[in-house]
Amino acid sequence: MALGELRKTARINAIRTAVENARSYGEEGSGPDDFQMSEEEFDLFKDECKKLALFLEKKADKLQYFLNRNQ
């Protein structure tokens, strides 16, 4: 595996880790008080985390596709 491929794999893994972290907000039992937010702010925050997770997941999938295609 060339260094370029190794870096791409590391980047994909980092992105997928970020996806799981973003998705976990609000699902692990935390609430608005844990983040010093109002209920409304926390709901918006969770929605934005879900959107971010979807965006990053698509990016990781695209990078994985191109990595697999070039091997």
Image (cartoon, rainbow, N blue to C red):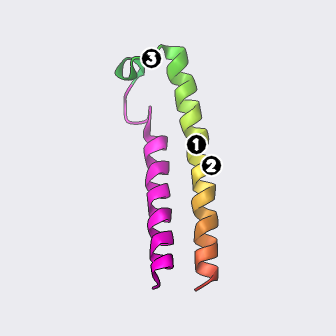
Q: Position of residue 24 (x, y in %)?
A: 43, 40
Identify which amino acid the numbered label 3 is placed on: Met
Q: Position of residue 31 (x, y in %)?
A: 40, 23
**Whether label 1 touches label 3, CB < 8 Å:** no
Q: Residue placed at 43% from the left, 35% from the top?
A: 27
Q: Residue placed at 59% from the left, 79% from the top?
A: 68
Q: Is residue 17 above or below residue 12?
A: above
Q: Secondary structure at mark 1?
A: helix
For residue 65, the mark is none
- Looking at the rendering, the stretch of residues picked out in magenta corresponds to 1-30
- Residue 28 covered by magenta stretch: yes
Question: Looking at this rendering, what residue extends furthest in the front direction?
Answer: 3
Q: CA distance from mark 2 to mark 1?
A: 5 Å
Q: Secondary structure at mark 2?
A: helix
For residue 37, the mark is 3
Identify which amino acid the numbered label 1 is placed on: Leu
For residue 52, the mark is 1
Q: Residue placed at 53% from the left, 18% from the top?
A: 41
Q: Residue placed at 37% from the left, 17% from the top?
A: 33
Task: Decide whether the magenta segment is chiefly helix, strand or loop.
Answer: helix
Q: Residues within 10 Å of mark 3 (few under 14, many from 20)?
A: few
Q: CA distance from mark 1 to mark 3?
A: 19 Å
- Residue 6 covered by magenta stretch: yes
Give the residue pinned by disc 2: 55
Q: Earlier in the sequence, mark 1 or mark 3?
A: 3
**Whether label 2 touches label 1, CB < 8 Å:** yes
Q: Name the image quarter holding residue 44.
A: top right
Q: Is residue 43 left or right of residue 55?
A: left
Q: Is residue 47 left or right of residue 4?
A: right
